[in-house]
Amino acid sequence: MRYIIIGAGAIGATIGGRLSEAGQDVVLVARGAHAQALAADGLRLTTAAGERVHRLPVVTGPTELGELRPDDVLLLTVKTQDAIAALDAWGDAEVAGGGTAAQRLPVLCLQNGVESERLALRRFARVYGVCVWLPATFLEPGVVSALCAPLTGILHLGRATGGTDTRVRAIAADLEKVGFGAPVVEDVMRWKYAKLLGNLGNAIQATTGLEPAPAKGALLLRAIREAKAAYGAAGIDYPTEAEQAAARDGKVDQPAGARGGSSWQSLARGTGSVEADYLNGEISLLGRLHGVATPVNDTLRQAANIFAREGLPPGAMSIEDLTALADEAAARA
């Protein structure tokens, strides 16, 4: 199989680099200064085992590869807000022997939240979900670090519509050879809904900074309570905390001083967008569909998007101000 990493940022570059260490055929898809750095100097990837430079093929789009191969696997690792453009561009790419990528090739969705699988299923016939536990940092073009140990990350995989097959088991086997846990599960979206609960705090970290504080934990708990109420109203199941701990604890330990999460990094790089519409916004959507008030998640989504649009640096708001906005929204709800 050849792995095409569509969005070689923190997650995509880590997976692509590690796969290449085992001799897998990997292509990185990137843009701008990051693509230029990858092409000129290679991917400088640091894991718990140390730093390695991976010199891999780099493209900005499918036309640079020509016809895709029937054994290609597409790993969609762009943020959800960029998924439609990527899915459309790569879905229309022709595959040797006839047909398009959307008709013939598997696409794996490695985004936070649960929307990317729905977007992909509108376009691709073979869609897989991946629940990503892989803390990684991408702040400088061409440079990525993922320092967890003893595993670099844990990636639960399964068909987006439920179930498993031989293809996803083969992909999981490749991932397990290069330092990832890769459980193949019957209901991968169940795991992704659980991961979403933790990601509700991304907006808090992005807007108020990395320093821990009791008030930040308290606001996150309020956001999670709203989410669990919305899940209950919608009939959405997810793994218990004990089940998640059994799958993760002692396997992906982070070193002290790890940098911020994906939304914090997006603001730090000045990308102009964050995933908040598909994290806190997913809870807002569920709440409106099922009659559950979600004022805290509404506030967090709005605040994170304002930071991204206006180019504000991460951490420019106090937790007191953010909590006050959530309190005002709750009073209106």
Image (tube, helix red, strand yellow):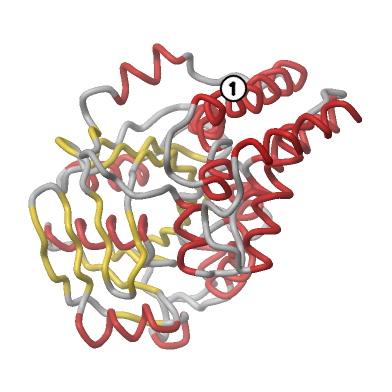
Most extreme residue toward the left is: 49
Q: Nearer the viewer, residue 273 or 12?
A: 273
Residue closer to the observer: 26 or 302:
302
Dividing the picture into quadrants, the one containing residue 137 is: bottom left
- Taking the spot 58% from the left edge, 49% from the top edge, the residue there is 207
Using the image, determine if residue 313 lies above or below residue 244: below
Residue at x 20%, y 83% (from the top left corner): 41
Taking the image as shown, residue 194 lies to the left or right of residue 16, namely right
| Residue occupied by mark 1 | 221
Q: Visible in this render: residue 50? A: yes
Q: Quadrant of the N terminus?
A: bottom left
The part of the image, by quadrant, that contains residue 307 is bottom right
Q: Amino acid at mark 1?
A: Leu
* 255 up-or-down from 123: above or below: above
Picture coordinates of residue 230 (x, y %)? 73, 23
In terms of depth relative to the viewer, which is nearer, 62 or 313?
Answer: 313
Drawn side of residue 33 relative to residue 14, left or right: right
Q: Residue at x 19, y 56 (%)?
A: 18
Q: State the image coordinates of residue 132 (x, y, percent, origin top left).
A: 40, 41
Quadrant holding the C terminus: top right
**What residue is shown at x 52% (from left), y 51% (from top)?**
315
